[in-house]
Amino acid sequence: MTTSIRRATPADIPAIRAILAAHGNDGPITTVDIVGPYVRHIVEHGTALVGVRDDEVVAYGATVDAGVAVHLADLFVRPDLLGQGIGRPLLEELFRGAARRTTFASDDPRALPLYVRAGMAPLWPDLYLEGEPAGLPQMDPSLSLEPAGASRLAALERAWTGVDRAADHAFWVSQAEADAFVVLEAGEPVAFACARARQADADRVIDRLLVRPGAEPVRPTLAAIRRGARGGRIMAAVAGPSPVLPALLAAGFRIRDRDQFMASEPGLVDPARLIPNPGML
Ligand SMILES: CC(C)(COP(=O)(O)OP(=O)(O)OC[C@H]1O[C@@H](n2cnc3c(N)ncnc32)[C@H](O)[C@@H]1OP(=O)(O)O)[C@@H](O)C(=O)NCCC(=O)NCCS
């Protein structure tokens, strides 16, 4: 049976969420809805495609233009149709014309080989660390933190990397219980972050953090994690090569999950200075 590929529309969101839920990537909303607004943002601002059979959505994939690369945000085939050649053409279509490519591969044995064939190499694991701020060292007195809106975060990112992610910053700060802020050293911005609530438990997560190129990354990242936690448990995705990893392990954080970062060339992402948004880099 043939599968056709077309652009996803907001009307497809319930079918997309059903496929995500079947893979455990969406689920009961015990606190706030995180996945719904995320998928809507991707459908409206990214490139989201669905695979359709007999008028039924059987697969979903999406990319976002992260500036440094076209980032594969999602690729999911309905569980009863895995391994039947549906994912590969969807991926080809999503990356058409993209010279620079990145993604976070799951541990599904079909994902990594598909991405290697799409020109990406596995570069490092991203480790999802969870813990409480109590074990973190006291904040360096030369650092301070102040709340910031989307336009300030977008302006800092533009200044530091040349990439305009204004639409994504507007989304990130709109999420449930979002707390967006800048970390300053001697009054100068050295990092910014956005923390938010999670869908299935009361913990919080660093949704995304960026450290200024060249700046020492550990102290501002730990300060951001402390603030983002609001005194409770918090999760952050840290790249394997980052010096933040040993610092968080020493503070009692535990590894709960991992993804494999893949890219079409090394050097697109600085692993020490980004806590990525897994969907959107
Ligand atoms: C990952 C996913 C999207 C791929 O879609 P799919 O339709 O199942 O994949 P396809 O059938 O098009 O291709 C799978 C490929 O993996 C290959 N493969 C499977 N197991 C493999 C293994 N252990 N080693 C090497 N290659 C393997 C297959 O041979 C096939 O390649 P081919 O086209 O050259 O024969 C799908 O399996 C899925 O939804 N997985 C669960 C959700 C998930 O983890 N998504 C990835 C998020 S990063």
Image (tube, rainbow, N blue to C red):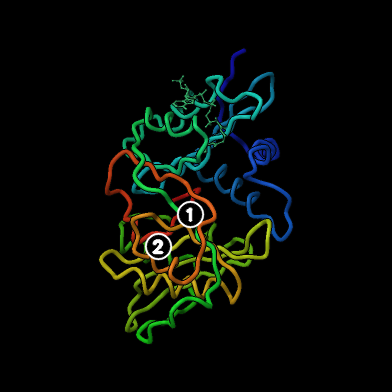
Decide if residue 36 is on the left or right side of residue 171: right
Q: Nearer the viewer, mark 2 or mark 1?
A: 2
Count of labels in the image: 2
* Number of the label disc, if any, that sits on residue 54: none
x 34%, y 32%: residue: 119
Which sits in the foreground, 56 or 106?
Answer: 106
Give the CA separation, mark 2 to mark 1.
17 Å
Q: Which residue is mark 1?
A: 277
Instruction: Looking at the picture, tell me which residue is in the foreground, 68 or 197.
Output: 197
- Expressed as whole percent of the image width and height from the top left, the position of residue 268 reads 30, 48
Placement of the N terminus among the 4 image quadrants: top right
Classify 10 Å Cα crowding around label 1: few (below 14), some (14-19), many (20 and above).
some
Vertical order, 119 against 27 (above or below): above
Q: Residue at x 67, y 41 (%)?
A: 21
| Local SS, label 1 | loop
Residue 188 in the image: above or below residue 125: below
What's the amino acid at mark 1? Asn
Residue labelled with disc 2: 245
Q: Position of residue 227 (x, y in %)?
A: 51, 75
What SS does tag 2 mark?
Answer: helix
Q: Which residue type carries mark 2?
A: Leu
